[in-house]
Image (tube, rainbow, N blue to C red):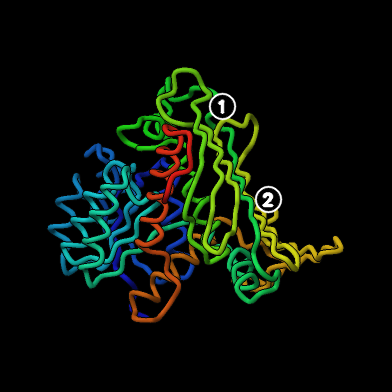
Amino acid sequence: MTKIRTAMIGGGIGGFIGEIHRIAMRLDDRYDLVAGALSSEPTRAMESARELEIRGYATWQELLEKEQGDVDCIVIVTPNDSHAEIATAALQAGYHVVLDKPMTRTLDEALSLEIVAAQSSKIFAMTYTYTGYPMVRHMRDRILAGDIGTIRTLSIDYRQGWLAEPIERDGQKQAAWRTDPRKSGAGALGDIGSHAEQLARFTTGLAIKKVRGDVYSLVEGRQVDDHASVQFKMEHGVVGDLVCSQVCTGERNHVSVRVWGDKGSLSWSHDSCDALKFTAPDGTETITFCTTNRAPSGHPAGFIEAFANLYKDCADEIEGKDTNCIGGSDGIASMKFIDAVLRSKESQTWSDV
């Protein structure tokens, strides 16, 4: 099998998300990471490339220029403020692009990038991790097949505790850029709220039409939101609620989604990611366990495998197969959601998405 020659921008050694992407790419052996501009700091970029034994570049501009013809796909795992510029340049230079979420820092940036992606013949994919979990995909299939009847309401919960203290003031790198509005745009709403709202759309197949949100900065002096609660209205009269927070002290990475219909409900939790619970109208609960992981049943399909499923979909798409690869339309929907929630906060009324 011919591998997809890949370069990474951002994600230097010692960071979190870059290594996750690299492991995920290796799991199905469909990609060959051959080059990288792995940091905005040239020295660290070159040191990281040497450690990974790939061709290194001090800047992403140099990489895009010199790797044409030798690289097929660019993976972008930089802070949000550079997403639009790098993804636009990569698509215009003729590369496939895999972009970490959220799509961009602002809605205007996302709309401009959407135009470029639509005009390109190359694949533009995004890594909304939780849609890669087998049981989230199974949940969507069952809901769309009518297992819970007509959807009425849903609830999404995503809570972390890692920003319960102002660690950005101590120089913690991940906290520093995520709490800097110039780099991140929104705070918790953009970082994990984008995952949560995308789960609402993914599992139901419905678009969010209106939102009413309260957005808070609970840690004193923080410049971005670290907690948000949102009511939303979807197509066909479906209503829901969403909470995302990064200041729930002691919470690790809790994600849950529950969808209620007129014939029952389905619920999934990251805490038990290989299980999907169906609750019948009489309260009877039936648990279905994952049987579609790469390993035999009973060997959990976790975070890395979910990322790998996204990369597998992208590889299939690049090779001309029809897949459910998550792309720019989801990115735009997330950015419109974030923008609408922030407008709702200011107006204290419902806002159109």
Residue at horizontal 30 percent and vertical 32 percent from the top: 182
Picture coordinates of residue 100 (x, y %)?
A: 38, 53
Q: Distance between the residues labelled 1 and 2?
A: 20 Å
Badge 1 local density, few (<14 within 10 Å), some, or many (20+)?
Answer: some
- SS of the residue under disc 2: helix
Instruction: Looking at the image, tell me whether mark 1 or mark 2 is earlier in sequence order.
Output: 1
Residue at horizontal 58 percent and vertical 41 percent from the top: 243
Position of the N terminus by quadrant? bottom left
Q: Quadrant of residue 252?
A: top right
- Vertical placement of residue 175 versus 298, above or below: above
- SS of the residue under disc 1: loop
Which residue occupies the foreground of this view, 129 or 330? 330
- Please give left or right for residue 45 compared with residue 20 in the image: left
Q: What residue type is labelled 1?
A: Ala
Q: Which amino acid does label 2 sit on?
A: Asp
Which residue occupies the foreground of this view, 317 or 227? 227
Which residue occupies the foreground of this view, 176 or 347? 347
- Vertical placement of residue 321 versus 72, above or below: below
Picture coordinates of residue 27 (x, y %)?
A: 49, 66
Q: How many marks?
A: 2
Residue at horizontal 59 percent and vertical 33 percent from the top: 161
Badge 2 local density, few (<14 within 10 Å), some, or many (20+)?
Answer: few
Name the residue that disc number 2 marks.
Answer: 271
Q: CB under 8 Å between callouts 1 and 2? A: no
Picture coordinates of residue 295 (x, y %)?
A: 63, 70
- Vertical placement of residue 288 versus 353, above or below: below
Q: Residue furthest top?
A: 220
Which residue occupies the foreground of this view, 221 or 46? 221
Name the residue that disc number 1 marks.
Answer: 164
Residue at horizontal 60 percent and vertical 54 percent from the top: 239
Picture coordinates of residue 345 (x, y %)?
A: 46, 34
